[in-house]
Image (tube, rainbow, N blue to C red):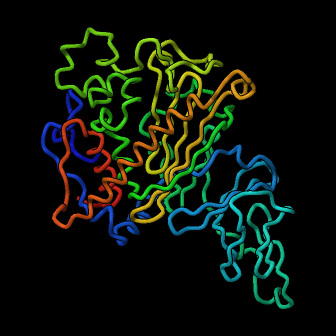
Amino acid sequence: MSADRHDDPTAGGFNGLKRLERTLPSSWYIDRPQYERELKDIWYRNWVYLCRAATLPEVQSFRTFSLGTQPLLLVRDEQGEIRGFYNTCRHRGSTLCQEAEGRLPAKTITCPYHAWSYRLNGELARIPSMGRAHYVDPREASLYAVPVKVWRGMVYVNLGDPARGFSDNFNANTEQFANWPVEELVVGHTLTTRLKCNWKLFWENYNECLHCPGVHPNLSSLVPIYRRAIMEERDDPNWRAHAASDDPQYKGGLRAGAATWSVDGRSLGHEFTTLTAAERRAGYHFMTSLPSHYMVFHVDHVRSTRLLPLGPEETELSVEWLFPRATLADPAVDIQRACSFSAEVLAEDGAACELAQRGLRAAPHERGFLMPEEYDVYRFHQWVKAALGAA
């Protein structure tokens, strides 16, 4: 946050806002020029999550993506490293790989238009033209490279500011999640959906629980503090009155007898043996990497959610449920007990975000208000404004 600590409306033992704050302007969720500004200053300057490294399993594996207006290509090269490029031929700009994913037929990337070919490290390999030697220096015609970082088996790219500290995106010290063997986990279920809302509305919804009692009845039953429309103990201005209590409605965590996020709260089995007693007791841990990614860590699985902006009023969500291999190999385990539960929560969140998007078009609604419990929405707004250089 850019505000000085002494002027920070979230400072103190109580988490909530201490003064009335306004939301971002409604136009920021609708106008295309604002959207394009956010692509340039936020999405193209931060490290953005694209996929798990395991989805590029072997040499010549590739995947394609669209980040805003930018076409991207990931390839695993001959040394086993993941390379990132713009999915654009240096000749006349044709798209190189048309499919969403696959395996190249040879150790080259060949343009389907005029057959220029490139090595897996991006170097120009061949031009099928009689005059090539007189016109193109291969050293000046490599593919446009995209910086790539692989964190715990997760592939991130940065289109405009690769010197930006990778950890700057995260909301917590990533070492907090060292006890979960993320790299070893396997995708058991996936879900991709498009929401008719601006990407910022999804993050705002993610950052508050005022909506939880009304929007998420089953989640609020599993996580009792959510029934109180708050996320943490100190979201309550009277939290000291319950400081000695272990009741999850005051302290957070799962209801008595529950172990994980599932339809009945029961673990799927094959729990992570490396977790501490405190990590097991809490039952869920969130890790956020703005603007594109968050993960939720449980005792028996991990959920990974990626956001990509599709337009001023449309956002793609892609969710992966990650499990130990033993879980997926066990015929007695029904992973849908976990997957269907969090998919229900996501669907409820998506519907709420779409409601908000539609309502923002009201001509007199220039901006809204933030309640004390929406302190993390305020922090998100400060992050957006700082990234845009806005006051």
Tell me which residue sits at (45%, 55%) in the image: 195
Point 50% across, 35% down: residue: 342
**In this rendering, is residue 215 above or below 85?**
above
Which of these two is toward me, 332 or 19? 332
* Image point (41%, 12%), residue name: 256
Q: Is residue 278 left or right of residue 133?
A: left
The answer to which image quadrant residue 250 occupies is top left
Dividing the picture into quarters, in which one does residue 324 lie?
top right
Q: Position of residue 25 (x, y in %)?
A: 23, 60
In the image as oriented, which residue stretches furthest toward the left?
19
Q: Is residue 230 above or below residue 102?
A: above
- Measured as percent of width and height from the top left, residue 4 is found at 21, 43
Above or below, 6 relative to 60: above
Q: Quadrant of the N terminus?
A: top left
Residue 303 lies, in percent from the top left, at 55, 36
Name the quadrant of the C terminus.
bottom left
Q: Is residue 39 left or right of residue 369?
A: right
- Residue under the image location 35 percent in, 47 percent down: 352
Q: Position of residue 288 (x, y in %)?
A: 45, 40
Q: Give the number of callouts.
A: 0
